Structures are given as structure tokens and as C-alpha cells.
Amino acid sequence: MACLAGDRFIFTCGLGEGDVRLNETWMMDVPLGISENSSELQFGIYPQPAGDYLVVESKNVILQRITLIDPAGRVVLDETLPPDNHICIAGLDAGIYFLQAWTVEKIAGIKKIIKE
């Protein structure tokens, strides 16, 4: 048997050899979600959904490069972020993509974008 009680998941199970009831119960916290902004390096993307261009706005980090990945995991765009932070995506098909933003030394984060 299993149930949720508030933010706890409770699981208890059953029968041992010869139909002997086992008294085993486990309780664990339920993860409620992961925030996209959990990193100290924050950036935003607009407009959403996007047309032919995206604008990447960084809040507390200098971004150097962006990579766009389709849902199948293929890299469809990998380029240096231009000074005006505008990225041309006119050649991409409509759909969902994942944008990775990079600093010089590491990935700053990943955001989901929708292309009209």
C-alpha cells in the first residue's frame, strides 16, 4: 500500500513466507519540483513563444555562447552570443527547443523555448 500524506510518501508492504504479515513501512519526502532559477547564474529569454529572433538577457553573468538542442538531443544551433544578444532562429522548424547558455568556463543554465 502507498499513499501521500502532505509532502510525505508512505509505503508499506505485505506478506512474507506462509502469508505472514511483514511490518515494513517507509516514509520519504516528496520532491515538489525544481526551479529553473535555482542556479546563482540567472538569465532570461524573450519573447516566448519566439518568432524569428530570441533575446537572451543575463542578470548577473556574462554569457559567451548559446546552444539550441531539439527534443531528440540534436544540436541545431551553436554560436557565440552576439553583442546585441539577439539570436536568429528563423531557419528552425516550429516546436520546442532547449537553450543552453554558457559563460567562458561553465554552463550558466538551460531554458525551454517554444518556436512558432
Image: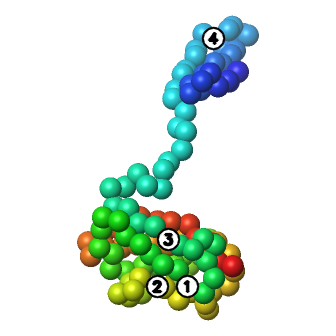
Residue kind at label 4, given as amino acid type: Leu
**At numbered mark 1, what does the secondary structure look like: helix, strand or loop?**
strand
For the residues labelled 4 and 3, the Cα–Cα distance comes to 53 Å
Query: Hey, which quadrant is residue 6 in on the image?
Result: top right
For the residues labelled 4 and 1, the Cα–Cα distance comes to 61 Å
Residue where numbered disc 1 is placed: 53
Percent coordinates x, y for residue 35 in the rendering: 48, 50
Nearest to N terminus: mark 2 or mark 4: 4
Residue where numbered disc 4 is placed: 22
Percent coordinates x, y for residue 7 in the rendering: 56, 27
Residue kind at label 3, given as amino acid type: Ile
Closer mark to the observer between disc 4 and disc 1: 1
Relative to 84, 90 lies left or right: right
For the residues labelled 1 and 2, the Cα–Cα distance comes to 6 Å
Nearest to N terminus: mark 3 or mark 2: 3
Depth check: 34 or 73 in front?
34
For the residues labelled 3 and 2, the Cα–Cα distance comes to 10 Å
**Quarter of the rendering occupied by the C terminus:** bottom right
**Are circles 4 and 3 on residues that touch, CB within 8 Å?**
no
* Residue at the (67%, 24%) spot, across then down: 3
Percent coordinates x, y for residue 88 in the rendering: 53, 89
* Residue at the (42%, 79%) spot, across then down: 66
Closer mark to the observer between disc 4 and disc 3: 3
Relative to 51, 79 lies left or right: left
Residue where numbered disc 3 is placed: 45
